[in-house]
Image (cartoon, rainbow, N blue to C red):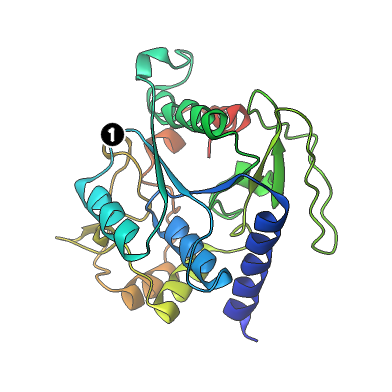
Amino acid sequence: MDDLDQLEAQSIYILREAYRKLKPLAMLWSLGKDSNVMLWLARKAFLGRVPFPVMHVDTGKKFPEMYRFRDEYTRKWELELLLGDCPPVEEIDPTLPPAARSAARKTAGLAAMIEKYKLEGVIAGIRRDEQATRAKERVFSPRGSSHKWDVRNQPPEFWDQYATPHEEGVHIRVHPLLSWREIDIWRYIEREGIPLVDLYFSRNGKRYRSLGDQDITSPIESDAATVAEVIAELQTTRTSERAGRAMDHESEDAFERLRVAGYL
C-alpha cells in the first residue's frame, strides 16, 4: 500500500465505525475539496451509496458555482440532502471580530440542525494541518449539551479504538480526514478523478485555495489551472492554505473561540 492507500483505508474504517456506533448520523457537506473527498470516501466505504444524510448549513452567501455543484451532485450521487439556514449576523456574539462573527452564523445553524434531527454523530472534513486549533482535535470528539468543545477533556485514542459516550445531549464529531494534508487531498483528487467546484482552478491569474462565503473569502495569485498544476504549486508555495480566509487575519484567538463554541 502507498501512502494514499493507507489514508484511504484509515478514513473508510473511521466512517464505518461511525456508522456502526452512532445513530442518527449525518455528514457535513461544505462543497469544498475536503468535504468532496470525504463524500467520495463514504461512497467507497458503503459500496457506492451514502447510507446517511448529508447536511449543508447554508449561510446564503456561497458562490453561485457552489450551489450549482451541490444541486448537480445531489442528483448524480443520489444523496439525501438536509438543508439548514443560519441566523442573521445581528444575532451573533458582537464581541467577535467582523469576519469571525459572520462565520459564526454556521455554528448556530449547525447547532439548530443537530437538535432538529437529534443527531448522535456528525461527520466533518477538518484536517490537523489546516489550522493550529484543529491539531488539538480527536478523530471521535465529543461535544457537550451546549455543543461546546472542551479542548482539555478529550478522550484518549489508542490503537484505533474510539470512545463514543452516550450521555444525554452529547453528540460526537467524527473527523475521518484528520491525518490528511492539503497535498494528500489534491493527490487523491487526481488519482480518483473527484469532481470539484471550478473556482479552485485559475481564472485570469487567480484561484481559490479555500472556499467559504463570498464576503469573507478571497482568491490567491495563481496560474494553476489543472489538478497537476495545483499539486506542483503546493510543493513550492510558502503561503498558508487559509491565507484567503478573512477571519484568520483577525484577532489571534478568534478561530479558537469559534471552535470551542461549536464551529466546524
**At 69% from the left edge and 52% from the top edge, which residue is drawn?**
139
For this view, does 145 lie left or right of residue 98?
right
Task: Indicate the position of residue 149 as horizontal and vertical percent values.
Answer: 67, 32
Q: Residue at x 55, y 49 (%)?
A: 124
Give the camera-side residue of 213 and 216: 213
Towards the viewer: 50 or 207: 50
- Splitting the image into 4 quarters, where does residue 233 fall? bottom left
Residue 130 in view here: yes
Depth order, front residue of 136/144: 144
If the image is split into quadrants, where does the N terminus sit?
A: bottom right
Please rate how many residues cluster around mark 1, counting C-alpha atoms within 10 Å: few if below 14, some from 14 to 19, many from 20.
few
Give, as a three-letter code, the residue at label 1.
Gly
Q: What x and y, as percent, mark residue 146?
A: 65, 23
Work out which residue is located at the far left of the displayed protein and give it: 204
In the picture shown, does residue 246 fall above or below 95? below
Residue linked to disc 1: 60
Residue 31 percent coordinates (x, y): 37, 52
Residue at (29% x, 44% y) in the render:
218
Q: Compared to 169, does 57 lie above or below?
A: below
Tell me residue 110's x, y (percent): 49, 33
Please give the name of the residue rendered at 42% of the width and 55% of the height, measured from the top-left corner: 239
Circle 1: element type: loop
**Residue 102 figure quarter:** top left
